[in-house]
Amino acid sequence: MKSTRNLLRAAFQSILKNRMRSLLTSLGIIIGVSAVIVMVSVGQGSQKQIEDNINALGTNLLIAYPGSASSSGARMGAGTRVRFSFADVEKLKKEATLLSAVSPLVMSGGQVIGGGKNWSTIVYGVSTDYFQIREWQVEYGNFFTEKDVAAKRKVAILGKTVANELFPDQDPTGQDIRIRNVPFKVIGVLKAKGQSGMGQDQDDMILAPSTTVFYRLKGGRWVDMINASAVSINDMDAAKEEMAAILRVAHKIEYGQEDDFTVRSQTEITEAVTETSRTMTLLLGAIAAVSLVVGGIGIMNIMLVSVTERTREIGIRLSVGARASDIMIQFLTEAVVLSVSGGIIGILLSGAVIMILDKFTTIYTAVNPEIIFISFLFSAIVGIFFGFYPARKAAAMDPIAALRYE
Amino acid sequence: MKTIIEARQLSRIYRVGEIDVHALRGVDLTIAEGELVAIMGASGSGKSTLMNILGCLDRPTSGRYYLDGREVNSLTNNDYAAIRNEHIGFVFQVFNLLARTTALDNVMLPLFYDRSHRIQDPNTAAKEALRRVGLEDRMDHEPNQLSGGQQQRVAIARALVNRPSIILADEPTGNLDSRTSIEIMALFQELNDQGITIILVTHEQDIASYTRRIISMRDGQIIRDIAVPQPRRAAADLASLPPPETEMIKEVRP
């Protein structure tokens, strides 16, 4: 213990005798460690941001899309791509035990005129379940009711973006707008959700009763999608199976035939998107790790110079009774102290950089304690690995030659 | 008197390229405890090689070497390191102090490698050694703040700190002016009076005249080995010299 302390003390003394050079030597490690931590934190931050955004779509979300991904148009006949109907939705509502809410989604694009302005957006025709499935909340006014849906009332709830475009800085509740020349009354404005994981503005849309959009805007052709909520996150897979099974019956698909629709769960969508950003994080981390290795080579370089420069010191130490192993340990300790100090400074530096990023930029960061520990450990290993060769070179010196070295 | 060094037919051959250089050719030498010996000779006479072998920094090509009655030829490198640490103190012509390191830390250096744990308190031992060479008030000075003579005193303190049985000095006055040289010789004589065996290599007859025995070498062999019945006393010579004004000027200017 005492000798370990002496060794560390000697290493620190020797490092402090050459402050500038020691700093420059450690710089590679400092930059390497902080690069690894910052890069991985930014990568994981954006990953987390994407996950958060996707989860903001609504938890336990299940989406049924029309048309099987593997079905071929030729076999099904040209122009007969199957969409969903209100009957499908009703069947799901009646028969599904694992779905807590089901809503059709009738989509219609179009020019919206209101407040003396106009805006091109998309109109979602939905049932009242939709608010629950997507966890929407109103900022002004109210949601429409089941009565509104049944009566095909021309009422609309504006997304925040649409509200801002048509009626800036005011509550548009009660105002009249025209969607593709069909008059609607604004009954509410949704609270903003911001961008989705895919970069879409989730607030650039209008919600209206599904029936209204179906019959007044689209001319009663089909339901584009079905959104549903599973009763719990643990039942997602079972709920997805149940939803698919009911739709197969509704669409009269026999055993062995391919589905003419696809059901995706929230988790699957999340995974697909986060997979990309995870790869990105890995890539960033790997590039930063390379700089850590380069930093290690820098340490080796300077240690080799230092061994040559301190040849006489090595000779003196040998002459007063140091063993070759003592010299070896001394230089190895110095290399490790240099790299570990560099690692610690690197961690502090990365902390500062991350704080600056959080404070002054919109870059999202997520600091993982694991990555701090790993990069610190890596810096110590780099010190041992790249300190070994110079240390061995120092230890192999002949005392007489070392003492005579000019 | 107890024999401390006994060398039998020591030879040392260096291979320089294709040529064998015979640095030592069958040296027989016996030195008793408490002696103050000068080894003289021109450069290339083999005196430094002999010194290195006696100091366990180098091994003879052939021949036997007994230190303190112990045959050291067959010992391992680590045993050699231990002998250098515990039995031998080196003093060099160029002082060989660690730069940017205080006198006290320089003197403590051998204790850093002391595995025998004979010395309990390195700090006290180092201060005591510095006191013995008269530098107790310069302990915190670094080598570049000390004069040549003072640096050599620090080196002698470092050689003393492990209480060695022998001090080996290789041209210890070679880089010093004549007055400082005599001061260093006075210190060696004082230490020798306290019972420490001292062997020094020199090519200056003046310096050798302060020792009790002069061994002359030529071409790797001892050609003369004479006792000095009445060595000069360096302390007395110092007293007869004019006051050290020049030395003081030298201290002011680096």
Image (cartoon, coloured by chain):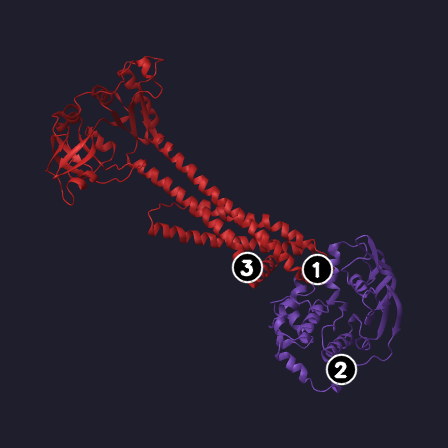
> Toward the viewer: A385 or A362?
A362
How crowded is the residue under tag 3: few (<14 C-alpha within 10 Å), some, or many (20+)? some
Residue A402: give its label.
1
Tell me what hue chain A is rendered in.
red
Q: Nearer the N terminus, badge 3 or badge 1? A: 3
Q: Position of residue A372 (x, y in %)?
A: 46, 47
Tell me what hue chain B is rendered in.
purple
Q: Is residue B54 left or right of residue A338?
A: right
In three-dimensional space, the C-alpha distance between marks 3 and 1, rounded to whole angstroms, equals 23 Å
- Element carrying mark 1: helix
Q: Amino acid at mark 2?
A: Ala
Q: Which image quadrant is residue A316 in?
A: bottom right
Q: Which image quadrant is residue A364 in?
A: top left
Q: Position of residue B217 (x, y in %)?
A: 86, 67
Q: Chain of mark 2?
A: B
Residue B235: give its label.
2
Q: Residue at x 59, y 47 (%)?
A: A385
Q: Amino acid at mark 1?
A: Ala
Q: Chain of mark 3?
A: A
Front position among marks 2 and 3: 3
Q: Position of residue A152 (x, y in %)?
A: 13, 26
B2 shown above or below A295: below
Q: Position of residue A312 (x, y in %)?
A: 67, 62
Front position among marks 1 and 2: 1
